[in-house]
Each structure stands twice: as structure tokens, then as C-alpha cells.
């Protein structure tokens, strides 16, 4: 088993659930804030894991590429398309990017 896989298994078993501390009065619901999410994800460093997220382009589509990095140098990547009704509108794409 790779070092990355061992660390990921240990990390997943030890990490707490992300709390929903944000509140939307319009919909009267709670949500996970970016600050809450980052605070939990940073705990992965205790298992020699780190993450990066970058904007990636392919065939006219914008993606958010997430890379999980282990101190051994092993990595895993995934890409999520940035979806919006108008891909030619920079403001709409900028607003949709954090959701991706």
C-alpha cells in the first residue's frame, strides 16, 4: 500500500466532521463556511498530507484541479468543471469557482 493511501486512511478516521457555523437568514438554514472547511482540512498535515487547488483550462472549459500531496511525493488529482449558465461572463465564472 502506498504511503499516501496509508496516510489518507489514518486522516479520514481521525478528522472531525465540518461544523455548519454559517447561517443564511433568507433560507433559514445552516451551512459550512470556507473558514470552517479550511480549519478541518489543515488537520490533514498531521498525517503528512497537503492540498492545492488551481484553475485549469481544457477545450474551452474551466476546471478547479485539486491535488492531494503526500510528503513522500505521491499525489492524487481530480478536476471539477466550473458550471454556470454563461461561461462567457467573467463575474459568473468567478462566483461559481469557489463552489467547484
Image: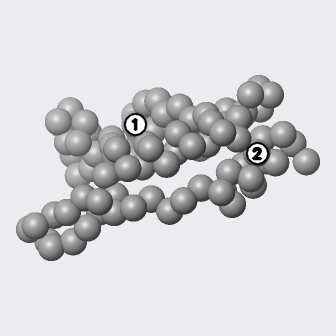
Side (left or right) of 97 relative to 71:
left
Q: Is residue 30 above or below residue 76?
A: below
Disc sitting over residue 17 in the figure:
none
Q: Is residue 90 above or below residue 98?
A: above
User: Which secondary structure, mark 1?
Assistant: strand
Q: Residue shown at 53%/31% (left/top)?
A: 52
Side (left or right) of 13 relative to 89:
right
Residue at the spot of label 2: 7
Other residues around mark 1 within 10 Å, as few (<14) / some (14–19) / many (≥20): some
Q: Nearer the viewer, residue 100 or 24?
A: 24
Residue 47 coordinates in the image, percent (x, y) = 70, 41
Numbered disc total: 2
**Which quadrant holds residue 15?**
bottom right
Disc sitting over residue 62 in the figure:
1
Side (left or right) of 78 relative to 75:
left
Q: Residue shown at 38%/50% (left/top)?
A: 36
Amino acid at each position: 500500500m502506498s504511503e499516501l493511501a496509508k496516510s489518507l486512511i489514518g486522516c479520514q478516521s481521525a478528522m472531525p466532521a465540518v461544523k455548519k457555523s454559517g447561517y443564511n437568514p433568507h433560507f433559514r438554514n445552516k451551512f459550512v463556511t470556507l473558514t470552517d472547511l479550511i480549519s478541518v482540512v489543515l488537520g490533514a498535515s498531521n498525517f503528512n498530507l497537503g492540498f492545492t487547488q488551481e484553475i485549469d483550462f481544457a477545450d474551452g472549459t474551466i476546471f478547479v484541479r485539486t491535488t492531494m500531496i503526500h510528503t513522500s511525493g505521491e499525489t492524487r488529482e481530480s478536476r471539477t468543471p466550473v458550471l454556470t449558465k454563461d461561461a462567457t461572463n467573467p463575474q459568473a465564472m468567478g462566483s461559481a469557482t469557489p463552489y467547484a
